[in-house]
């Protein structure tokens, strides 16, 4: 049954949490596994079975270099076998930074009196989207503070407005959102506006530690935030993204908790999260967090490899919070989506660069400020296939990561051709001559990976794109 604002009733009893911190802590003081056990867990993942919480904990307990190398190599192999070399690209668009919460790590928190507060006007929103389209972006994530202005109706209207902006051959084909938790009727509204993924991070899954960082406002209610994706599911919004903010507490705890959250969604709704994000804490205006739980680059790479093995069919996102070299490394171990050309200052996409270097205007510092063109260049150099594909979502094939993973030949038949088409569009509309040369060289190589009966059709579709047709997908 589809819930609508008319036919659902608010539950009398709030949804209950499903994280048992003690259970997770207990797993983290277990014995380190022997080599044979590590190999057995890794083999399980490579044979496309999802890892249990206990298996994942064992991989986390491993810290000798040889065993870590086994885990990383397995993650590389799994990624290659399951996903090929496509990397999906997107950009964040900050819509408004008014916020009633006081999250001690965030530049937008209500207690930060130096923050410059802005909500994009309708015209400014259009300008921002046009600027993003002129760069070649096709997929956006809209980001909002938590404030009474940013109601589900406001968010839904913003999403519709973004879809309506067309500049030249540009258009936004998928709008995801990262916004405060809603009630079920709110989720119905944003779903009806056509959002892709609703993303929300628990920040820290540890209930006691959570209190320390969330001093005021609705976000200080741990359970309400934790159960937001359950309400989304109740609203029929089953494309959801989870995440934790690394640097607030022990990374090993947060990694296991995200696996637990995945288990919970799979067990209750038969669908796991579409994506997992693992942002690391960055400097922010008047931030109030000490460095006790700062996560090293080495642990970060290890964590990505472990997650890849634990949840093989979930998209993994690494954002421009990370430096370019860190992103390059974790792409190998399983990251499947990155943002490019990212600007966090509100209104900055349509402004001159010189005016946009103010930490009080952004939520936190960006680690990778390369343009989309430059990110694509590097991907091409490293033989990744940049993709703006939105085919499954628009064809109603939900759970695409699961299909990639479980339907034999799905990647060869659908994913690779569709990624190629979006890259060809990008090259035609926005690529430099040099980039076109590199891009079409890679496309030629990729065509060899496509289902052999479809290779000619791929070529003729590329010809249609070269002649000016757009938005072709299977
Ligand atoms: N206000 C909404 C919320 O808190 O869920 C949505 C947007 S918030 C701007 C997006 C995410 O940015 C937060 O969930 C948090 O994980 C992350 N974030 C906040 N401060 C950060 C910092 N200093 N460094 C890195 N990420 C940060
Ligand atoms: Fe507000 Fe979100 Fe920042 Fe917290 S993380 S202060 S809720 S914008």
Image (tube, rainbow, N blue to C red):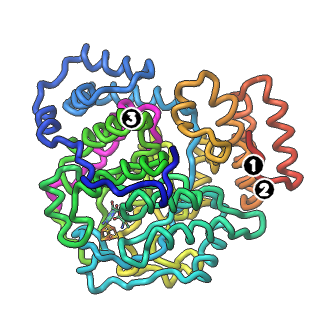
Looking at the picture, tell me which residue is in the foreground, 428 or 272. Answer: 272
Asked if residue 287 is positioned above or below residue 171 in the image, the reply reads below
Looking at the picture, tell me which residue is in the foreground, 302 or 208. Answer: 208
Q: Which residues are magenta?
A: 291-316
Residue where numbered disc 1 is placed: 424
Q: CA distance from mark 1 to mark 2?
A: 6 Å
Residue where numbered disc 2 is placed: 428
Residue 314 part of the magenta segment: yes
Residue where numbered disc 3 is placed: 266
Q: Do tag 2 and tag 3 residues touch (Cβ < 8 Å)?
A: no
Q: Do tag 1 and tag 2 residues touch (Cβ < 8 Å)?
A: yes
- Helix, strand or loop under label 3: helix
Instruction: Please tell me which residue is depicted at 47% across the width and 41% down the height of the picture.
Output: 315
- Helix, strand or loop under label 2: helix
Looking at the picture, tell me which residue is in the foreground, 127 or 153. Answer: 153
Picture quadrant of ligand 2: bottom left
């Amino acid at each position: 049954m589809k819930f609508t604002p008319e036919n659902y009733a608010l539950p009398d009893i709030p949804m209950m949490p499903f994280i048992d911190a003690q259970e997770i802590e207990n797993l983290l003081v277990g014995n380190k596994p022997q080599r044979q056990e590590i190999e057995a867990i890794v083999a399980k993942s490579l044979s496309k079975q999802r890892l249990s919480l206990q298996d994942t904990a064992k991989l986390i307990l491993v810290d000798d270099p040889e065993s870590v190398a086994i885990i990383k190599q397995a993650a590389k192999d799994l990624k290659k076998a399951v996903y090929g070399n496509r990397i999906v690209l997107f950009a964040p668009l900050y819509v408004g930074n008014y916020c009633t919460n006081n999250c001690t790590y965030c530049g937008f928190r209500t207690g930060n009196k130096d923050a410059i507060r802005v909500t994009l006007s309708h015209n400014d929103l259009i300008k921002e989207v046009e600027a993003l389209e002129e760069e070649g972006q096709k997929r956006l994530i809209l980001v909002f503070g938590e404030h009474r202005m940013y109601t589900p109706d406001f968010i839904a209207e913003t999403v519709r407005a973004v879809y309506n902006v067309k500049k030249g051959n540009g258009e936004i084909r998928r709008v995801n959102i990262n916004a405060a938790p809603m009630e079920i009727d709110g989720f119905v509204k944003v779903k009806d506006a056509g959002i892709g993924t609703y993303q929300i991070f628990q920040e820290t899954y540890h209930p006691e530690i959570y209190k320390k960082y969330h001093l005021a406002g609705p976000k200080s209610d741990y359970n309400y935030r934790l159960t937001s994706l359950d309400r989304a599911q109740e609203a029929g919004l089953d494309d959801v993204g989870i995440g934790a903010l690394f640097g607030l507490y022990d990374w090993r705890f947060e990694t296991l908790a995200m696996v637990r959250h995945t288990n919970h969604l799979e067990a209750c709704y038969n669908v796991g999260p579409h994506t997992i994000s693992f942002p690391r804490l960055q400097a922010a205006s008047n931030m109030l967090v000490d460095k006790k739980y700062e996560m090293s680059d080495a642990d970060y790479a290890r964590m990505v490899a472990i997650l890849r093995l634990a949840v093989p069919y979930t998209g993994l996102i690494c954002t421009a919070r990370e430096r370019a070299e860190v992103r390059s490394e974790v792409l190998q171990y399983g990251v499947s989506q990155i943002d490019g050309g990212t600007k966090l200052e509100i209104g900055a996409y349509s402004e001159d660069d010189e005016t946009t270097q103010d930490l009080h205007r952004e939520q936190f510092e960006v680690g990778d400020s390369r343009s989309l063109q430059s990110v694509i260049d590097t991907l091409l150099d490293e033989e990744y296939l940049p993709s703006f594909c939105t085919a499954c979502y628009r064809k109603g094939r939900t759970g695409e990561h699961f299909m990639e993973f479980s339907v034999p030949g799905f990647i060869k038949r659908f994913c690779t051709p569709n990624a190629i088409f979006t890259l060809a569009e990008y090259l035609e509309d926005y690529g430099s001559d040099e980039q076109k040369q590199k891009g079409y060289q890679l496309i030629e190589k990729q065509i060899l990976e496509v289902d052999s009966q479809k290779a000619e059709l791929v070529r003729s579709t590329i010809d249609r794109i070269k002649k000016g047709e757009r938005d072709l997908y299977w």
